[in-house]
Amino acid sequence: MDHLQSVRIFVKVADVGSFVGAANALDISNAVVTRHVADLESRLSTRLLHRTTRSLSLTESGQVYLERARQILDDLEDVEQMVTARNHEPVGTLRIVAPVVFGLHTLAPVLQSYSQSYPKVVPDVTLVDRHVDFVEEGYDVGIVIARQMRTGSIVTRRLTNDCMTVCATPAYLNEHGTPTRPEHLMDHPCLNPPSEYWGEEHVFSGEHGDVRVRPANVITANNTEMLRQFALLGMGVAILPSYLISKDVAQGRLVRLLPEYRLPQVEINVAYPSRRHLPVKVRTFIDHLVEYFARKAEQVAAFPDGAGKGAVPMRKMAGMEAVAAL
């Protein structure tokens, strides 16, 4: 009996929750499904499924086997598609969604280099600062912040990391004083992204452990570029992505605060609805994104420390911040 086919049938049974459902989905008889699962259990000398007249569930061994089997089948499909894709040219519209500031500061050069390599793919870009349902809204691929993701139904690949940075203008600090401890933020208006993105409180990691702060006076906006403008206007102390304000700091418009403390890093991913039957245009764009950020990271590693007033050594920057500074 075809062992690989038995694995596929077992995974389908586990996915749909019944032998009959798997048979219908695969357009084969219930008897064939039963035979393949029984053969698989015989090969493994263990029961993979608990069966009753009313229910079907995985055994502990079945759960372990399912996770690895699904990964193996996905990897096999990836390899087959990779080989097939070598003979197909990416074409068509590529619907991309990304956070507004990321799109404005980072996505444009990525798309420019991708379009040079694949001129028959037409990017259709939407920039939004909200949670996105990829399937419902019809996007092929998107940029997401890991902590904003609400569901595990999409597949992700990490692009880079960034961290949040506390900053304010020199004029604001001269007038209102400079916070030297996280608790001092309670005495200042704080310019924060919405709590749904970053949480109600900020966790500062320092030499003596973590300090948790929940600012009392918060000015918020769902667009970090607007918060940056608020900060530049001296409206308060901002907590913003490092890459967004790195040039402002280097040019003296903003001052980094609490340098001995570190806010958590944020993982920035490329996301897409499914890895099954991924169109060539999507696969090539994802690979291009990953390679682009890997190449930038290599450039950052080789870049000498920044020089001049207000410059920040490159080796101390988070991934996105260093990319933005190039």
Image (spheres, grey):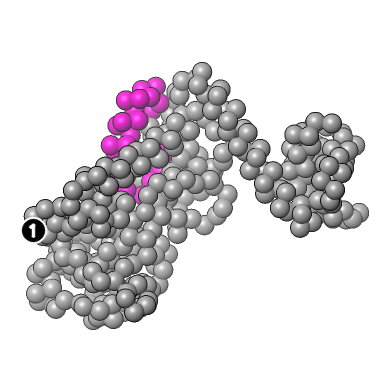
Q: Position of residue 86 (x, y in %)?
A: 50, 21
Three-letter amino acid code of the residue under disc 1: Lys
Q: Residue at point 55% right, 54% down?
A: 151
Picture quadrant of residue 106 = top left
Vertical arrangement, residue 302 with respect to residue 118, above or below: below
Q: Position of residue 114 (x, y in %)?
A: 35, 30
- Relative horizontal placement of residue 103, taking residue 38 as reference (left or right): left
- Relative horizontal placement of residue 326, taking residue 214 as reference (left or right): left
* Magenta span contains residue 98: yes
What secondary structure is found at the residue carrying circle 1?
Answer: loop
- Magenta residues, dominant SS class: helix
Q: Which residues are magenta?
A: 96-122
* Magenta span contains residue 236: no
Front one among 35 and 173? 35
Vertical arrangement, residue 188 with respect to residue 107, above or below: below
The residue identified by callout 1 is 309
Q: Residue at point 44% right, 48% down?
A: 158
